[in-house]
Amino acid sequence: MSMSDSPAVGIVGLGGMGTQHASNLTALGADVVGGSDVVTEARDEFAAAFDAVTFDDHEAMYDELDLDAVVITTPNAFHEPAATAALERDVHVLCEKPLADSLPDAERIVAADEASDAFCMVGFSNRFAAAPSLFRAYQADGEFGDVEAVEGAFVRRRGIPGLDSWFTNRDLSGGGALIDIGVHAIDYALYLAGFPDVVEVSGVTRDTFISGDAYVDPDDFAGGWDATEGERDVEDSATLLLRCADDTTISLEVAWATNREPDHEFHVRGTEGGARLAIGGDELQVLGSDDRALDHHRDTTLSGDPDRDRYVEEAATFLDGVRAGERPAINHVEEGLLVQRVIDAVYESSERGTSVRLDDAEGVSEDERAAKLE
């Protein structure tokens, strides 16, 4: 590597997220010099947009270019080979969420990170929105006391990704709504709770809509799509409960599709106060009380910068770490591994019909997970 104020960055996976990351990094002073994708059209468009060299294989890009960092935005199944190959070359990595499509793959990335002179940062972008930043500032001042419980939802009323895409193909994604948007909910809740030690997980996954004869998204003016086309061997919703060593509890609802209003709100209950905030939001409601007054509730709504772009903030944090050669203090790969352990335990709990202790978790085989959805 040849480090400078303009680090040389490669993008692995040149779809919408890859292009967005490339644009943000370029605006922040990075030099996006290369990209890799198996799709010819994606490579051609990326090369034209960023004047970058493109490859159909990430290994070829790593070998050909002198890279300081890479951003990985491929389907989940390809995160591990792309990330470990970069870390083995001491190239810094920003890996989109989830860390991997399975717990063993996530563990391999963490092992590669530990052995490397470079670092891996996980793309939990929602931490960089205005609301959680306000929350953490108040939390540091003791406004909420000890967090006792977090309740949250990442629920779409109708919002299953296209069935002909990799999102609903277990071999490429590792799962459905839980591993796609549930990963955000789990990370967000753990982040707000201060990453307590999770000891037990209970969960149920469902395939109510994705396994039906037809699915129509009322917001899709093309009329939706035929659910008999493409792969659909994943779940479309999940309910989960996490118990932590200090008795903190985290309860979450996750859905690509369900018969309720969309919901992205999280509620935090502490010993001294509470809070309400949404994933990706810029407002924080602080819930306080004064027991000495007749009208004792003291609630305040705070607004952060509405123009704050969480993806830009994430990219800036990553670049600061690359330039300094130091791991950022946020979005650590070990946190990504814990989220992956929780996801794996939810699948196991749903399959077995019992709660799962993380220290006893055996994991669910691909055959068992697929059988539940047949």
Image (tube, grey):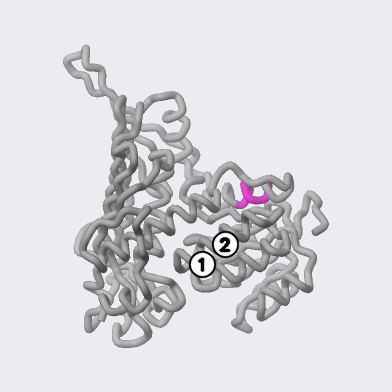
Which quadrant of the view contains residue 86? bottom right
Q: Say what amino acid the circle numbered 2 marks.
A: Ile
Vertical position of residue 17 compared to residue 300: above or below: below
Question: Which mark, residue 105?
Answer: 1
Q: How many marks?
A: 2
Vertical position of residue 240 compared to residue 373: above or below: above
Residue occupying image coordinates x 31% and y 69%: 219
Residue occupying image coordinates x 34% and y 48%: 199
Q: Residues within 10 Å of mark 2 (few under 14, many from 20)?
A: many
Residue 44 seen anywhere in this rendered image of the structure: no
Where residue 218 appears, as percent x and y from the top left, is 27, 71
Magenta stretch: helix, strand or loop mostly? helix
Where residue 286 appears, as percent x and y from the top left, is 34, 31
Where residue 265 appears, as percent x and y from the top left, is 31, 47
Where residue 237 appears, as percent x and y from the top left, is 28, 65
Residue occupying image coordinates x 66% and y 56%: 115
Closer to us: 128 or 247: 247
Q: Which residues are magenta?
A: 315-320
Question: Which mark, residue 109?
Answer: 2
User: For the view shown, which residue lies furthest in the bottom direction?
Assistant: 229
Q: Residues within 10 Å of mark 1 (few under 14, many from 20)?
A: many
Left or right: where 73 falls relative to 139: right
Please tell me whether mark 2 sits on a helix, a strand or a loop.
helix
Instruction: Kindly indicate whether the residue at mark 2 contacts the one at mark 1 (C-beta within 8 angstroms).
Output: yes
Q: Quadrant of the N terminus?
A: bottom right
Residue occupying image coordinates x 56% and y 68%: 80
